[in-house]
Image (cartoon, rainbow, N blue to C red):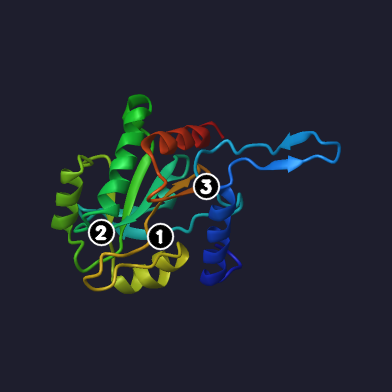
Amino acid sequence: MLGSSPAQRFLLVLLALLVAALCVVIIDHPQGATVTAAASPFDGPTLPANLRAADFSLTDQYGHRVTLSQYRGHVVVLTFIHSLCHDACPLMVQDIKGALNELPRDGAGVIALGVSVDPSQDTRANRRMFLAKQGMTGRMRFLNGPRSYLKRVVWKDYAIAPQEGTVETHSAYILLISPSGFERVGFPADEATPGGVAHDIRVLERT
């Protein structure tokens, strides 16, 4: 994000997620009537409309170079995962898979990207194995790169706390990026559903 520090960006995203969790606000009218605030078109927590998704350059599970900017014009589903994770990561990827399955042509044209939170363990073989186990071979690109680059650029730009050592804890959310390259929706792992993710993808495709 231009013009803000990672800490400011993290607080901005956190605040947006907390506010968006209140989907409808009821306001008491002075005359006793009730006014309902306009509901968001999205099912998931929305992010500020001007939050541009930071570009990056990484390699997928086959060694092919991938940049976020090459997918301008498409809705991008971005998440941060670990190939050896047994809880949040499979859950998020299954939510993404379910969402793609609900879309026309099984989500063809929607880009699903997973970025490593542990580059030393997320080898090409482990990434391919993870995607195969989740039934996402050919449907998701699992990206990795040097830890220094991930830490200095990608994790920093997306306010990601990576996996540390053997502790299976890291930032876990599904981010939806608009065709024009802006972060619009951020589902925490425990709030995402295939239906909700699919719904919000459709909204972004219409905008």
Q: Is residue 189 left or right of residue 128?
A: right
Q: Which label's residue is closer to the chain start, 1 or 2?
A: 1
Q: Is residue 190 left or right of residue 25?
A: left
**Cβ–Cβ under 8 Å for marks 1 and 3:** no
Crowd band around label 2 with a 10 angstrom C-alpha radius: few (<14), some (14–19), many (20+): many
Q: Give the position of the N terminus as an image quadrant.
A: bottom right
- The CA distance from mark 1 to mark 2 is 18 Å
Task: Determine which of the numbered discs, if any, sits on residue 121 in the image.
Answer: none
Image quadrant assignment for residue 193: top left
Residue sitting nearer the eye, 84 or 126: 84
Query: Where is mark 3, residue-wise?
Result: 45
- The CA distance from mark 1 to mark 3 is 24 Å
Query: Where is mark 2, residue-wise?
Result: 82
Residue at the (47%, 32%) spot, across then down: 202
- Foreground mark, 1 or 3, reads 3
Query: Where is mark 1, residue-wise?
Result: 56
The amino acid type, in three-letter code, at marker 2 is His
157 w.r.t. 62: above or below: below
Badge 3 element: loop
Badge 2 element: loop
Image quadrant assignment for residue 8: bottom right
Residue sitting nearer the eye, 138 or 65: 138
The amino acid type, in three-letter code, at marker 1 is Phe
Residue at the (45%, 62%) spot, across then down: 158
The amino acid type, in three-letter code, at marker 3 is Pro
Residue at the (62%, 40%) spot, across then down: 24
- Foreground mark, 2 or 3, reads 3
